[in-house]
Image: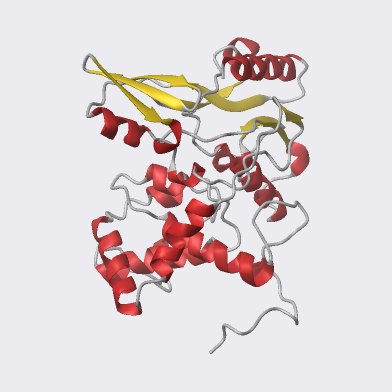
Amino acid sequence: MQEISSKIREIAAKLLAEKKVEAVLGFMPGTIPLISAPTVAGTSDEAASLCWDRFCGVNLANYLPKRTGGRVAVIAKGCDSRSIAGLVTENQIKRENVYIIGVPCTGMIDRAKVMAAAGSPEVELIENDEQVIIKADGKEITVALSDVLQDNCQGCEHRNPVVFDELIGAKVEEAAGGKINAAVAKVEAMPQNERWKHFDEMYSTCIRCYACRNACPLCYCEQCFVDDSQPQWCGKSTHPVDVKTFHIFRAYHCAGRCTDCGACERACPVNINVRELTRKLEKEVKELYGYEAGLRLEAMPPLGVYKEKDPQEFIK
């Protein structure tokens, strides 16, 4: 990770010094343990504070839509690069205005999982190949790295950036994605009444803070449907009907566009498994249309185009 951080700082300083970009979107060490914070480096001196580690989970593509100004560079993992490709395809950003510094990724660590294992928020972490040593309250715990990765990173099928101007390091081996699809299959196997009960319970703690929406690079609308009043599509309360209407509508809005970056779940203050709905829809889109979001700049999401030979078997 130190080598990647050094390379990022070197590339960022060079781009800024040569005025090829006016800013670099990246990460700097956070003010609390196990968090790396998004930052904007506008000078070579500021570029010296950029870093890269397993806590750079935020999808920086979220800061690109409707941005004014000149060309910027952005650090992008596999899922981030796919989000950027989607934004280019949907005409939210221009490809020539973004210099993509790609970083192959083998997974980001979930801070909540580490704190749960340690039983304390004051944690020190040491990576050791496929293991992680957690130090807290004078004790040491060794756990498998896979056990503390973000859920979306376990079995990620696109770890390498799919579009980039410069790639740092060698590409990594892709995973099979079985764990993610297994979670979807578990819900699919439930009888319909149990499935509704499951979703009722899942969203019962939602406080309508919209953190999931605000963290998502796909939610770039000038005004969200939940904020419309003429007509009003969804109530503002935490009544179960309003809550589920918001989440279901948002999930369908993301269908065929979601790159499973995990931004929604990471942002949720009450730990709702928001990805269960989006992963189900992405699975359906892949099976029906053979399409995965953000893999090609020229490919529009299936629900954004009409073709006479589109599958129709789902229409009842």
Q: How is the image coloured?
A: secondary structure
> Which residue shows up at 64% across the image and 16% down it?
9
Counting the numbered discs, the total is: 0
In which quarter of the view is residue 106 placed? top right
Is 160 drawn above or below residue 219 in the view shown?
A: above
Task: Say left or right for 36 vs 137.
Answer: right
**Which residue is located at x 45 percent, y 36 percent?**
146
Pinpoint residue 303: horizontal percent, then vertical percent: 63, 69
Image x and y of residue 154, in percent: 49, 44
Residue visible at 45% across and 67% down in the picture? 249
Left or right, residue 64 beside residue 162: left
Give the farthest residue toward the bottom: 316
Residue 25, position in %: x, y?
60, 28
Quarter of the image with the N terminus is top right
- Out of 21 and 118, give the one closest to the viewer: 118
| Residue 157 visible to the viewer | yes
Residue 219 appears anywhere in the view: no
**x 77%, y 33%: residue:** 165
Q: Nearer the viewer, residue 271 or 223?
A: 271
Q: Residue 5 appears in which quarter of the rendering? A: top right
Residue 121 horizontal/vertical position (percent): 26, 26
